[in-house]
Image (tube, rainbow, N blue to C red):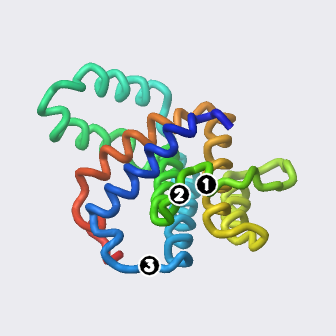
Amino acid sequence: MEVVKKETIDKWIITAYDINKANGFHDSSYTDNHRLMMIVTEIGEAIESDRKRRHLDKKAFEIFAFLDKSFAKNQYWQEKGFVQMFETTVKDTFEDELADICIRCCDFIGTKSLTFNDAFSGPVEFPNGFYNHFAEKGWDWVRILNDAKFDVPARVAGLMYEVLWYCEEHFIDIEKHVDWKLRYNRSRPRLHGKAY
């Protein structure tokens, strides 16, 4: 798989783990089931964004990418502008929720001190069916996390593989969305203002 380079995914694994640790998500000893459920909630949020038709349109994506590149060295943009623009343009869109799934997967793999290749045992076999709605695809992704034929890190890496391919097939620049979401998460309060 070279939809996203493995080196990039391994960088995400380290970064997601480090950001989540700094934000308090590793202060308690959570079980694998807890972490898997957090991934499932992100799948649910992606379904909700799709149901509400909250997709980032191509023009908004291009404008945000242009501004981010243009103001890369601007202190205001780095400290406040990026976060404000992200919250009004990208946050909670379908693409942003797909990035959240990837970040949760990366954090899980990071908690096991693994690289993507260490965790990944190959694509998960599902019949290539027609999906009327993204909810059906989301259900297949939940099924991947429950497939007892594989150990838990392999399931998580298998899910991430499926998400990356989905994005490739639907022309979603998931690499940009994950990078943006990781940057945004650095600015968030402890536990993102939640109980866990």
Amino acid, disc 3: Tyr
Q: Residues within 10 Å of mark 2 (few under 14, many from 20)?
A: some
Select label 2 or label 3 by which is in front.
2
Q: Is residue 184 left or right of residue 165?
A: left
Percent position of residue 126, x then y: 83, 55
- The C terminus lies in which quarter of the figure? bottom left
**Cα gap from disc 2 to disc 1, whole angstroms:** 6 Å
Percent position of residue 30, x then y: 44, 78
Write down the quadrant of residue 141 in the picture.
Answer: bottom right
Decide which of tag 2 and tag 3 comes sooner along the chain. 3
**Cα gap from disc 1 to disc 3, whole angstroms:** 21 Å
Q: Secondary structure at mark 2?
A: loop
Q: Is residue 180 left or right of residue 109?
A: left
Amino acid, disc 1: Asp
Q: Residues within 10 Å of mark 3 (few under 14, many from 20)?
A: few
- The N terminus lies in which quarter of the figure? top right
Percent position of residue 192, x then y: 29, 64
Q: Secondary structure at mark 3?
A: loop
Q: Residue at x 67, y 52 (%)?
A: 134
Q: Which residue is mark 2?
A: 114
Q: Which residue is mark 3?
A: 30
Amino acid, disc 2: Leu
* Disc on res. 49: none
Q: Is residue 22 left or right of residue 26?
A: left
Tag 2–tag 1 contact (CB < 8 Å): yes
Q: Is residue 76 above or below residue 10?
A: above
